[in-house]
């Protein structure tokens, strides 16, 4: 009997030992699960992004399509035909990053009291004088002629008028609202001389073989810069970033520059594939035309000190020509975004 009691007591002790061990294992398991669940999940930053039809949209086609090399950002893209609409959206504070003409970037900076700053350049010179005929042989041969253009109040106006003034040329300029409108007018033969950017230059010459490139305004700009010994470059477009957004999300801004740079590389290295992507994104209508135009679009991605050097030189020239073209005064150093 005593032996039986001892055996029973021993069995009870073993059972209790297993029970304690099992409880200990369960507790450890729950604790481990809880620890994993409590680890913070990194939320992707949404970037409200505005682009323009034309070279800017072509260069940024991957971002327009929402593509990123990182899952840390999500792009909400809007595509605009008219840069003044983008400027208005920025002044309202509705965009985090936006493509605008370079002079408009300075104007936005002034009108928003520094709430938007220049992030990076996206296009250099893309402007050409097109003619249906053979009367334009040099810049001075425009004297007395009627020329149609686009971009009133933006870079095309100030660049063309600057070049005319420096060469003592007086001609009548009529501005149309959109590049597409002037393109269609030239294709139809209703306009003899017009100033257009790429890729509309290529579109025009492909659809009307009588229309030719008469003058490259980048070359005309460079002639003046060389004669006056200034280091300015013709710089058509840039991205601006909302400073508050950049201060809160420096990594997202850094990722944007990387994504845009990668998009530019893909576009310029494979124009045919880029043309298809551009057409699918609704940036331009013809993939073949875009592919042919890309090598002449001067699409680029320039940030940091190099951007500051190029852009400040360009804005200085515009300011000396017409102070209101850059908002009435040259922007200070805070205008140029320094990557963190």
Image: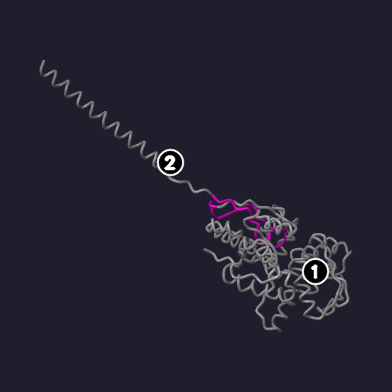
- Residue 68 belongs to the span the image colors magenta: yes
Residue at the far top: name it: 1
Left/right placement of residue 41 relative to residue 332 reads left
Query: Looking at the image, which is closer to me, 321 or 8?
Result: 321
Q: What residue is shown with label 2?
A: 37
Q: What residue is shown with label 1?
A: 195
Residues rendered magenta in the picture: 44-72
Residue 20 found in image quarter: top left
Left/right placement of residue 126 relative to residue 248 reads right
109 shown above or below 225? above
Check contact, mark 1 vs mark 2: CB within 8 A: no
Residue 291 found in image quarter: bottom right
Residue at the far front: name it: 113
Q: Dot 1: within a 10 Å radius of its alpha carbon, few (fewer than 14), some, or many (20 or more) residues? A: many
Q: Position of residue 255 (x, y in %)?
A: 55, 58
The quarter of the picture where the N terminus appears is top left
Residue 98 found in image quarter: bottom right
For marks 1 and 2, give the one nearer the viewer. 2
Q: Secondary structure at mark 1?
A: strand
Q: Position of residue 269 (x, y in %)?
A: 63, 64
Q: Secondary structure at mark 2?
A: helix
């Amino acid at each position: 009997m005593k032996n039986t009691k001892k055996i029973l007591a021993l069995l009870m002790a073993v059972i209790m030992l297993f029970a304690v061990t099992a409880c200990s294992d369960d507790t450890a398991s729950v604790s481990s699960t809880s620890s994993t669940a409590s680890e913070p999940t990194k939320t992707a930053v949404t970037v409200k992004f505005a682009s323009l039809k034309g070279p800017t949209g072509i260069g940024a086609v991957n971002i327009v399509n929402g593509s990123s090399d990182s899952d840390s950002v999500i792009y909400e893209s809007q595509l605009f035909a008219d840069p003044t609409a983008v400027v208005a959206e920025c002044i309202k504070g509705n965009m985090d990053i936006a493509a605008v003409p370079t002079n408009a970037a300075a104007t936005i900076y002034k009108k928003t009291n520094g709430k938007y700053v220049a992030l990076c350049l996206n296009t250099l010179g893309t402007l050409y004088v097109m003619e249906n005929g053979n009367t334009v042989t040099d810049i001075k041969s425009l004297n007395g002629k009627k020329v149609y253009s686009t971009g009133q109040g933006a870079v095309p106006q100030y660049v063309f008028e600057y070049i005319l003034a420096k060469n003592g040329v007086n001609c009548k300029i009529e501005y149309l609202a959109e590049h597409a409108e002037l393109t269609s007018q030239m294709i139809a033969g209703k306009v003899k001389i017009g100033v257009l950017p790429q890729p509309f230059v290529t579109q025009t010459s492909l659809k009307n073989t009588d229309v030719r490139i008469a003058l490259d305004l980048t070359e005309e700009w460079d002639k003046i810069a060389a004669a006056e010994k200034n280091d300015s470059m013709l710089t058509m477009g840039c991205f601006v970033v909302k400073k508050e957004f950049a201060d809160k999300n420096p990594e997202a801004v850094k990722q944007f520059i990387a994504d845009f740079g990668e998009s530019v590389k893909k576009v310029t290295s494979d124009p045919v594939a880029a043309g298809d992507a551009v057409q699918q994104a609704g940036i331009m209508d013809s993939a073949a035309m875009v592919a042919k135009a890309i090598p002449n679009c001067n699409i680029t991605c320039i940030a940091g000190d190099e951007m500051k050097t190029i852009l400040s030189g360009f804005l200085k020239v515009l300011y000396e020509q017409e102070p209101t073209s850059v908002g009435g005064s040259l922007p200070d150093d805070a205008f140029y975004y320094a990557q963190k």
